[in-house]
Image (tube, helix red, strand yellow):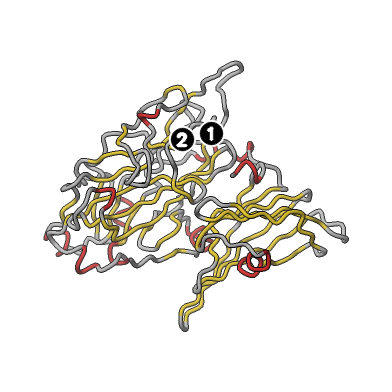
Amino acid sequence: MKKWLVIAIAVMAVFGFSIAAYAGCHNCEKCLPGYVECELTSGQGVEDPQCGTFDYDSTRTTSGNPSEWCSDSIRSIDTCRVIFDICQCEDVEENFDSGQTIGIRMTLMINGVFAEADDGFYFAETPWGTNVLETFDSLDAACTADTQTKSFGTTTFYDDADAAVASVVTPRTGIGACPVDAANQAVMMCTDQGQGFTITSDVEINQESKWWIDMLAMRIDPNILHNSELLSVKIELLNAESGGICATCESICECIVDIATVCCPEEEAEANCIWFPYVMQQDEYWQTGLGLTASSFDGTSWTADISFTDKTGATFTDEDKTFTDGTVAIDVDAWITAKGWEPAAGPGWICIESTESIGGLEYIMFMLEDMLFGAAVNPEECCSCAGLQ
């Protein structure tokens, strides 16, 4: 299917957008991913921390601490919204015609990899499907509306992104002690067979191509997640008429939404550990590089351990890599090739740990025929590379 990868993260930051991954999915002005609490206990001697919930597109609050939004992530209600631009989806005239029924699938991700049942990141809302969608003819209208009146019908939750091994589960709602029971470890949700939103003639005639979709509430288990992990949700619109259960329905439009980073900024790592959550490599249309600066460079040399983790979770580490300049550039593909590594092609992430205070950016270029586009992305700080793996 057609996937429009949004790499203009620097541009999006200027305008306040926080959706990452595929164009066709937008957000509203002044929305940025937040931070969620990761304290292991709510007081000395408390063995079972409370797993509070957080909601991407509703009021952010620090009540019910921990596992809720950090204080500097509070913002007014409905600033963040997931809005699909249907005109950017695949085969629009065929898949989004009047009378077509569209389903939905949401899957949780940690550091760019699909979450599994015991990974500590779960949906925390049920039921879902009624009054969770509204369609508009403009992005402005989608960002300023007050209510949603449309439905995707009934939905089912699963404990794995792989339909072949997934079991049906029920999300735990509200605040309760961790860990979350196996019967409540929901990491994927999708519409049931025969369910979905049926496009009406009014939606087609009025060209309501901007679809505002409600995001489910979530929770983390801070016993498991407490090392600046990036939490995301992959959202797919489905061809509900293509056959199969929802977990195997054909995806006809998708995007990945970055929700939050685990741990409040004051709890985050020292400046000698940084990581880049989304790094593309071994793709003919993409070229990715890193620019690194050791701010405490003394004019002789400095070293760093640099690791690349591919989309399967395999990690490759370049230990004690030595640099003789305070500012250096690394071509990711050339570096991987020179090391003789064979990671899975496509996206992954890079972590850099040094005894020096370091900073940097990731620069990305997209090349297709006569089109060239570039962007730069700042890193996240981390406690340690080992803690991210």
Q: Amino acid at mark 2?
A: Asp
Q: Quadrant of residue 169?
A: top left
| Label 2 secondary element | loop
Question: Which residue is label 2 attached to?
Answer: 118
Q: Residue 118 in the image: state x and y as whole percent.
A: 46, 35
Question: Which residue is label 1 attached to?
Answer: 224
Is 48 situated left or right of 363 in this image?
Answer: left
Q: Residue 99 in the image: state x and y as whole percent.
A: 12, 59
| Label 1 secondary element | loop
Q: Quadrant of residue 270?
A: top right
Q: Residue 249 in the image: state x and y as whole percent.
A: 25, 54
Q: Residue furthest top?
A: 45
Q: Amino acid at mark 1?
A: Ile
Picture layout, residue 48 above or below residue 19: above
* Cβ atoms under marks 2 and 1 closer than 8 Å: yes
Q: Residue furthest bottom?
A: 370
Q: Residue at x 51, y 20 (%)?
A: 48
Q: Residue at x 58, y 19 (%)?
A: 43
- Placement of the C terminus among the 4 image quadrants: top right
Between 234 and 113, the one nearer to me in the picture = 113
Q: Residue 148 in the image: state x and y as whole percent.
A: 24, 45
Between 322 and 80, the one nearer to me in the picture = 322
